[in-house]
Image (spheres, rainbow, N blue to C red):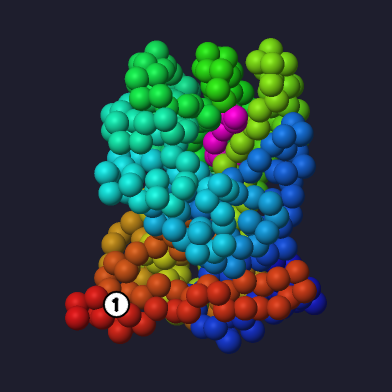
Amino acid sequence: MQLENGKYVINGASVEDIAKEHGTPLYVYDLKIIGERVNDLKTKIGAYKNTKFMYAIKTNYNPDVVKFITSKGIGIDAVSLEEVKLAMKFGVAAEDIMYTENNMTDAEMDETEELGVLINFGSISRLKKYGQKYPGNKVSVRFNPNVGAASHATNITGGPDSKFGVSYEYLDEVLKVCEEHNLTIVGVHEHIGSGWLGLEEPLVAMDVILDIARQIPTLEFVDCGGGFGVPYKEDQEPLDIETLGQKFNEKFTAFCEEYGRELTLKFEPGRFFVAEGGHLLTEVNTLKDSPNGKIFAGTDTGMHHLVRPAMYGSYHPMRNVSNPEGATKNYDVTGNICESADFFGKDFPLNELREGDILSIDFAGAYGLCMASNYQFRPLPAEVTVDESGTVKLARRRQTFEDLYNFYE
Ligand SMILES: Cc1ncc(COP(=O)(O)O)c(C=O)c1O
């Protein structure tokens, strides 16, 4: 979103006009920015010549966003059967999808098998059940490398306290189960958490998974997961993807030489691709003073549409789209949900807000609408995309009361 002649635009399209035409609250995705971030990772993190990216579809499964990303040669990392089926509806081939399971049911296992999608097993228990039913098949195994990193403690997925994957200490047991059922391990996987900005933990995790990989002669790929962080705060140092890509390349090239074969190196980014390109537009409809000098700016959206700030105190930059020249004041920006946790920012500096102004909550493209709910029986917002030339397209219509009520009939 840029300021041009005193008006905020996305690729030339007026943000206020988009809000007027499609109403608020509204998720807007800038495909140009998403394309740039995809390109950044492909060129920098993909320094090793045989790298394959799998988009973590859980981050944002808007059809136009997903199709745009997969059109750039990116596969899909799914974490539920429904995500697998959604990706297939969007035209992704079974061989370009991997399903990283977590507490998979027998029915989910059978349907995934029928669809021909590779399962990345997160427990020895499920691996055994799969081996008993489908001996002789190919599998991938998610290992917990005993190292974790994330932007918030709740988003760490590696280390002894994490529920995810099979501990690296149980490798022998994994090998035994696979031998018993004649399963071929074609992939090993680790994912240490979401939103990390440092280089140390992902490189340590890669060392651990490569140590495991050395002991499995049948591999086709090593998957180092996602988690590439983005700087939500203006003063945050961005992730050094150039250096990280070089180091991944060095380590993996050396590994493949020793292994005797060139394997595929996979990554599963979600947030890095889509966070920055997404904006949640909302109308400020209620300004309220407090005796202690605070000004509450009440919006027509809330934690049911963007839960990250209420859920783990995450920061989102915001801007007043309607009054970019206004004097700066500090506001507590609140949602319309009847919960005290429902804030988007406290003491947040914004150009003066007036009732009716459009506020943009930025960096909202990742873990936004996909984590939204109908709490307090409120409908979900619409979503639009804006392409490179500024063409605005409705990608998902706004829910209605009837959409929700129909479940009871
Ligand atoms: C297995 C797996 N892969 C990839 C991702 C994507 O993470 P991120 O959006 O931080 O890149 C996640 C999300 O936590 C995940 O659970």
Nearer-the-camera pick, 341 or 224: 224
| Observer able to see residue 223 | yes
Nearer-the-camera pick, 113 or 362: 113
User: Residue 30 in the image: x percent, y percent?
Assistant: 66, 66
Quadrant the C terminus occupies = bottom left
User: Residue 59 in the image: x percent, y percent?
Assistant: 50, 53
Vertical order, 197 against 59 (above or below): above
Three-letter code for the amino acid on which mark 1 is drawn: Leu
Q: Say if the magenta span includes residue 262.
A: no
Q: Tell me the magenta residue range.
A: 220-229
Residue on which disc 1 sits: 404
User: Residue 54 in the image: x percent, y percent?
Assistant: 59, 45
Q: How many residues crowd mark 1 within 10 Å: few (<14), some (14–19), many (20+)?
A: some
User: Residue 304 in the image: x percent, y percent?
Assistant: 37, 64
Residue drawn at point x = 40 percent, y = 34 percent: 121
Magenta stretch, main secondary structure class: loop
